[in-house]
């Protein structure tokens, strides 16, 4: 199951190659952008029954995460406090890469997503949101009489 | 503590470098690393000679047959290597993992802690 969320496809390989050559991939087709370095990073997957969103947001209090869904746009916001101390004569910050501050990310859900059927769980620093697709849009077998 | 050039290792596999904070105070170093999706069982910390290696494997619940349509985290693995300097004590490292955040405390060896030197005036 681990690999499902990362299964390689050709596009992703190309993306990675481009990245390795140093080309930024910030030119996103979506009007809401979606750069790579944003917090939290998002992976989105789907099955015929559901849309699965994984927000990689470590170190949060789950009750402080705000999640809302409005006309097909899912938004996720919150704040992560800084762990860095004020630098003084006794402490030195050698590396400070971890994100701190307010964040907000939005995801456009497909038309068949059912806004009344959303579940979210936070575990090991990952917020996993599952949105069920409406039954009418799921593939059905049609019997031929 | 210095970061080891792990480009060679990165080329060999596709592990991602976790974001870290490294803070030093008089008694030692605190290293905080973001390892979202890594449970305790997926974390591998080891110190060999002067090298500290942090490795984590992401384990996520995913339904059967899921296809990924958008991916910002490209790999299911994290890896980062640091070189510890002599004054740090690898024997007394403590670690805690909570909500995908790893906190490591690496104390200085006792003798290496800064001491106020008393000046006796006779």
Image (cartoon, rainbow, N blue to C red):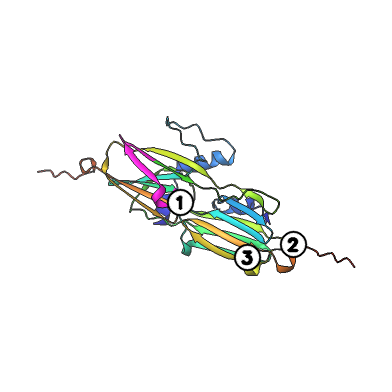
Q: CA distance from mark 1 to mark 3?
A: 28 Å
Determine the secondary structure under disc 3: strand
Magenta-drawn segment? A56-75
Position in image of residue B33 (x %, y %): 55, 54
The alpha-carbon separation of the residues under discs 3 and 2 comes to 24 Å
Number of numbered markers: 3
In the foreground, A17 or A84:
A84
Q: Residues within 10 Å of mark 2 (few under 14, many from 20)?
A: few
Judge the density around disc 1: few (<14), some (14-19), many (≥20) Cα neighbours within 10 Å: many
Identify whether B97 is placed above or below B7. below
Q: Residue B54: where, in percent of width, then height?
A: 57, 59
Q: Nearer the viewer, residue A111 or A70?
A: A70
Q: Can marks 2 and 1 be said to lie on one chain?
A: no
- Among the 4 quarters of the image, the one containing residue A68: top left
Image check: B112 left or right of A116?
right
Residue wearing tag 3: B47
Mark 1 lies on residue? A60
Q: CA distance from mark 2 to mark 1?
A: 35 Å
Q: Chain of mark 1?
A: A
Task: Give the quadrant of the C terminus of chain B.
Answer: bottom right
Q: Residue at x 44, y 50 (%)?
A: A6
Q: Is residue B23 above or below residue B69?
A: below
Is residue B51 highlighted in magenta? no
Q: Residue reaching furthest bottom?
A: B91
Disc 1 or disc 3, which is closer to the eye?
A: 1
The residue identified by callout 2 is B114
Q: Quadrant of the N terminus of chain B?
A: bottom right
């Amino acid at each position: 199951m681990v690999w499902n969320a990362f299964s390689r496809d050709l596009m992703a390989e190309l993306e990675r190659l481009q990245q390795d050559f140093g080309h930024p991939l910030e030119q996103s087709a979506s009007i809401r952008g979606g750069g790579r370095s944003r917090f939290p990073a998002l992976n989105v997957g789907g099955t015929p029954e559901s849309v699965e969103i994984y927000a990689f947001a470590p170190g949060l209090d789950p009750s402080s995460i705000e999640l809302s869904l409005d006309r097909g746009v899912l938004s996720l916001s919150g704040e992560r406090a800084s762990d860095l101390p004020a630098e003084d004569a006794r402490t030195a910050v050698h590396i400070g890469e971890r994100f701190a501050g307010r964040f907000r990310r939005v995801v456009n859900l497909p038309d068949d997503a059912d806004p009344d059927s959303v579940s979210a769980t936070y575990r090991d620093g990952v917020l996993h949101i599952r949105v069920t697709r409406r039954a009418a849009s799921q593939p059905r077998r049609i019997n031929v009489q | 503590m210095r970061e080891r050039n792990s480009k060679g290792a990165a080329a060999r596999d596709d592990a991602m470098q976790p974001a870290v904070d490294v803070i030093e105070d008089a008694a030692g170093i605190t290293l905080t690393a973001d390892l979202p999706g890594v449970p305790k069982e997926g974390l591998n910390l080891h110190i060999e000679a002067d090298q500290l290696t942090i490795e984590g494997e992401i384990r996520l619940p995913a339904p059967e047959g899921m296809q990924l349509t958008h991916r910002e985290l490209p790999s299911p693995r994290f890896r980062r290597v640091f070189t510890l300097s002599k004054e740090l004590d690898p024997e007394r490292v403590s670690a805690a993992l909570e909500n995908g955040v790893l906190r490591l405390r690496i104390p200085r060896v006792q003798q290496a802690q800064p001491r106020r030197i008393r000046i006796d005036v006779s």
